[in-house]
Image (cartoon, helix red, strand yellow):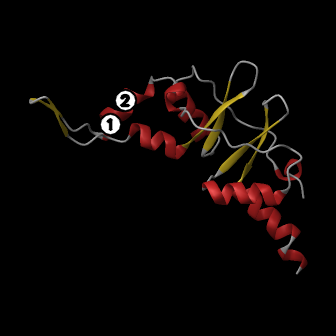
Amino acid sequence: MLVNEIMIKNVFTAHPEQTIKELLTIMIENKIGGVPVIDENGKLLGMISDGDILRYISPRKQTIHDYFLHITVIPDVTLSTAVKTSLQQPVSRLLKNRKIVTLSEDDDLSKAVSLISKHHFKKIPVVDTENRVVGVVSRGDAIRMIYKDIIEKI
């Protein structure tokens, strides 16, 4: 079975200049846990998950810095304050400088399963030869196809 047979083709995306609040609205309204971030040409820049957002907005604990004995105390930040501060930040703040793992439409289901399990991803973007997003494959999609294609036939 090929990726193009199981991928979700109606993909919700975000742009780097959108705010985190706009990104959260997309995710909440569409009940999704992650979106590809694309440029103005539809080319993939990265993936943002609900976990990335939680890590970004999580309150920081009080820390003490010793800059050559000039002590600086950074106070605790509450969740409410952290969220309010984060909402107007651009989505680009969440993008990480790491290799983006993708699938192509012609990849086999086994490659999708391997990448999802190896990297502990919930979703993997599917791109064409010009790195434009054409779909996503989720863990749930992969499990449903394994069940339908293999388990039901046993």
Label 2–label 1 contact, CB within 8 A: yes
Q: Secondary structure at mark 1?
A: helix
Q: Quadrant of residue 10?
A: top right
Number of numbered tags placed on the structure image: 2
Q: Quadrant of the C terminus?
A: bottom right
**In this rendering, would 80 be left or right of 63?**
right
Q: Secondary structure at mark 2?
A: helix
Q: Quadrant of residue 98?
A: top right
- Judge by depth and name the residue closer to the eye, 23 or 104: 104
Residue 9 in picture, x, y percent from top left:
82, 41
| Number of residues whose C-alpha sits closer than 10 Å to that of mark 1, classed few (under 14), some (14–19) or many (20 or more) | few
> Disc 2 to disc 1, how far (Cα)?
6 Å
Q: Quadrant of the N terminus?
A: bottom right
Which residue matches tag 1?
80
Residue 117 in picture, x, y percent from top left:
66, 60
Q: Amino acid at mark 1?
A: Ser
**Which label is found at residue 33?**
none
Q: Amino acid at mark 2?
A: Lys
Residue 150 in picture, x, y percent from top left:
86, 72
**In this rendering, would 89 be left or right of 108?**
left
Residue located at (81% from left, 48% from top): 7
- Does 101 appear above or below 12? below
Residue 23 in picture, x, y percent from top left:
56, 31
Residue located at (86% from left, 55% from top): 108
Which residue matches tag 2?
84
- Judge by depth and name the residue closer to the eye, 45 or 137: 45
Q: Quadrant of residue 130?
A: top right
Residue located at (86% from left, 75% from top): 152
